[in-house]
Image (cartoon, coloured by chain):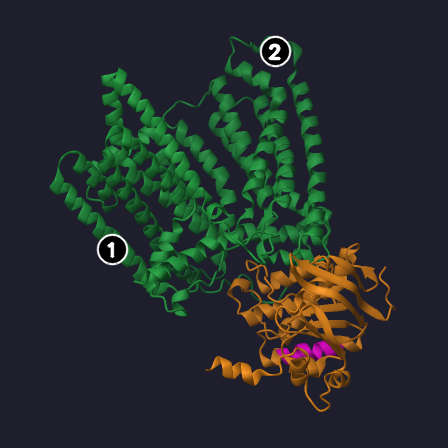
Amino acid sequence: MLTANSAVAVELKGVVKRYHELVAVNKLNLSINVGEIFGLLGPNGSGKSTTLKMMLGLVKPDEGSITVLGKDVQKDAVAVKQQVGYVPESPRLYEFLTGIEYLDFIGDIYGISTEEKKNRITEYLRALQLEGREGDMISSYSEGMKQKIALISAFLHRPRLLILDEPLNALDPRSARIVKEVLHKLKTQGVTTIMSTHVLEIAQAICDRIGIMYQGKLLALGNMNELRQMAKLPDSGLEDIFLNLTGSADLKAVVEELLK
Amino acid sequence: MNWRNILALMHVERKSGRLLRGVKLTRYRESGFFAYWPYWVGLAFGVGAGLLAGLIYSKTILTEADVMLLFREGTVSIFLTLPTLVLVYNLVFTMLQQIQRSGIKASSQVPYWLPVTWEEYTLASILANLLGFPLASIIFIVSTIMTFSAFSSQLLFASITSFAVLGAAFMASALTEILRILQVRFIGAVYKTSGRAAVWVRFFGSLFFFLAFYIIYLYVTSGGAITFIQTIKSTQTTAWFIPFVWLGMMLYSFTSGLLIQGSVFLVLSILFLAGLFFLAALLNKQFGLYEPPAIKISRGAYVPRTGFLGKLGFTATEAALIRKDLRAFTRRRELMSVFIIPIVLILVQVMQSTGSTMATPSAQVFVYLAASTFLLPSTVTAISLGNFMIGEEGQAIWRIYASPISAKTLVKSKYFFIIFFSVIVLAITGALAFIVYNPSLRATIVAYIEALFLICALGAISLSNGIKGADFTEIPRPRMIRLSWSLINLGICLMASVAILAPFFPFALSAMLPETVPNLTLEAFLNPLLALAISAIIAVILTGIFYQIAIRNARDLLTKTEI
């Protein structure tokens, strides 16, 4: 049994991940609370995706420990995965299946009852405007449609933890809004969401706390007010804070150099 | 024509093979020598073969003048047929490569977003088709004939033959490119008109395509190498008006002293090659970005089914995996070859026995037939499926890793799929063999049971190795299993087959050599039922051991492999 009442959903202690000489994640300590929407930000190659994959056991840390919903993800992988919904950065789906067949497959994998599965799939397809295309092979879908299918497959089994790597990639504005609303609604039901994104407005709008990663390390962690204090930018938005903390503030000079 | 663009595009194609499972490509370095190993091997073997033939030839000159003459005539015959031979074989290989690539929707239409012309793109594509085995075989052939010609003083003839061989390879690849473009366009049109039946139209269409292709190939090659060469030699002189034999005709004319005729065929060949290339470029320009229309499989309200697998005792997860694999093998064109193998094996059998009276086979013939029709198609199916079942997941393997699927569940569903399909193949090919060759009832039952033993054991062995050696690379073609593990698996399967069938070897010997090992004497100390029981024990032990190894390998795959 997973510890249902624990206040901490995910805990990383001294996590290190190396790819040969490259240190992708460097001594990361992080604690994410139950029912929290947590945003993981950082420039490309800062270690966000690797961190998210380690939380689900898709990448093994070289050092440190990761506890997800009270369980060691390496020791109890199947039990943890049963409670987690995951969307990777670029989800490769089974392109030879139709949208409905894919979701049916996911429903069966997570052991959702037949009636429940039917209701949930129908609701999500309607909400994300995939009705009418669900019988087509996924190979004929646009990137946005594939992303919708990947998101539905993450929500379908009502997980207690959502790990979403760039979840709003390629989505149309209406669907992006629906997904944001769904995440808010799930939060009220105690579902924890950890997401990475490059769209800072989204992170600022929906995340309770934000972690900024840079070169494998956690540079800053906190809510918007705490981040403003850390960056010493009291009235600024997340973009300025992010650029300030990651040392990319002097963009003017870079642009001028490029256009010389 | 910008040759740097062409070379760059070809390099991309060559390097696409780097995406190997589990290899983290940070600070990737490539050894110039090892990157081209198939070509070095081709060259080494070619020079070796040429040296060997040259030494035999030199020795013959000194001793037997008549033999030397025959040798020289034989060489000329082979040289004359080489262009057409290379054309046929390269057509086969490049077509097979295209079939394997057909399931991948790679957006490589670079002329749309890079300053590359359609002509450059098409030429690079034609040349890249030849990379790998086709080019290695060409290097082997060219180096063999060039080395040999140094001994036989035929350097000029060998040089012209080498150019003709290169031209023939280009011809084959250009033809493949043309057929590929037309096929994509044609298939798209068929899907559009066939609506919801498109998936089955594609399945049976692909089966038909494979079969037609193999029948032609088997028809040409069934007579053996010498007959094949003789057929080509006689065919190309009578079918001189077919452009594909013009290179061969050019060589024939030059060796016969018909210089003007040879020159005409040379010019015609060059014009035909250019024509093929420009046709391919034109078709690419016309249809290059053509996307087949979406295949609609279902419509109306969604009705989930519990299905027949649930009634068999499979959990929802296991049944879902089996159903997903069933759809993969009936919808992914590159996986359909698994269904073709047993049909081709039967075809080979039928084509080889055409013309002989097989209604009442002799005991010797029956042993051969039993092996090839009862045992071979179903066991080859089990081996192929076992090898591919995990690797076929491709880049979508993350779905398996991220889902709550245990190693036992994964192996159970995959193993069931292997056994299920192999048994269907066995039922069909066995029934066919029974009807056509009319063996005794006892022999039929024994053959069926032994085939079942082989399916169970070889399926487990191949699955365990298929998991261990799984390769999820999809571009330029789905690999599914690493070559090294495929070879290891073949070796283990061979040994296991020998072990399982060993109790029946005395009976097989008795059937093959009735005078030496009479059946009555044999049955006095070895009962067929006892042989069956021993065989069953060996099969059960092997199946059990390798099933457990498969679970262990799956556990490693699910916990150690990173995406």
At label 2, the amino acid type is Leu
Q: Specify whether residue A182 is painted magenta.
A: yes
The residue indicated by pointer 1 is: B275
Identify the residue at horizontal 72%, vertical 48% (top origin). Answer: B555
Identify the residue at horizontal 45%, vertical 42% (top origin). Answer: B38
Q: Are marks 2 and 1 on the same chain?
A: yes
Residue B405 in view in this figure: yes
**What x and y, as percent, mark residue A173?**
59, 81
Above or below, B103 relative to A37:
above
Q: Specify whether residue B17 is painted magenta.
A: no
Query: Mark 2 near mark 1, Cβ–Cβ under 8 Å?
Result: no
The mark found on residue B522 in the picture is: 2
**What x and y, as percent, mark residue B398?**
64, 58
Tell which subunit mark 2 falls on. B
Residue A90 is left or right of residue A228, and the answer is: left
| Highlighted range, magenta | A176-185
Pick the front one: A227 or B207:
A227
For numbered disc 1, what is the local secondary structure? Answer: helix
Mark 2 or mark 1, which is nearer to you? 1
- Magenta segment's dominant SS is helix
The part of the image, by quadrant, that contains residue A158 is: bottom right
**What x and y, as percent, mark residue A29?**
78, 68
Pick the front one: A132 or B123:
B123
The part of the image, by quadrant, that contains residue A206 is: bottom right
Q: Quadrant of the N terminus of chain B?
A: bottom left
**What x and y, as percent, mark residue B23?**
60, 53
Q: Residues within 10 Å of mark 1 (few under 14, many from 20)?
A: few
At label 1, the amino acid type is Gly
Residue B151 is left or right of residue A223, and the answer is: left
The hue used for chain A is orange
Q: Determine the CA span between mark 2 and mark 1.
A: 67 Å
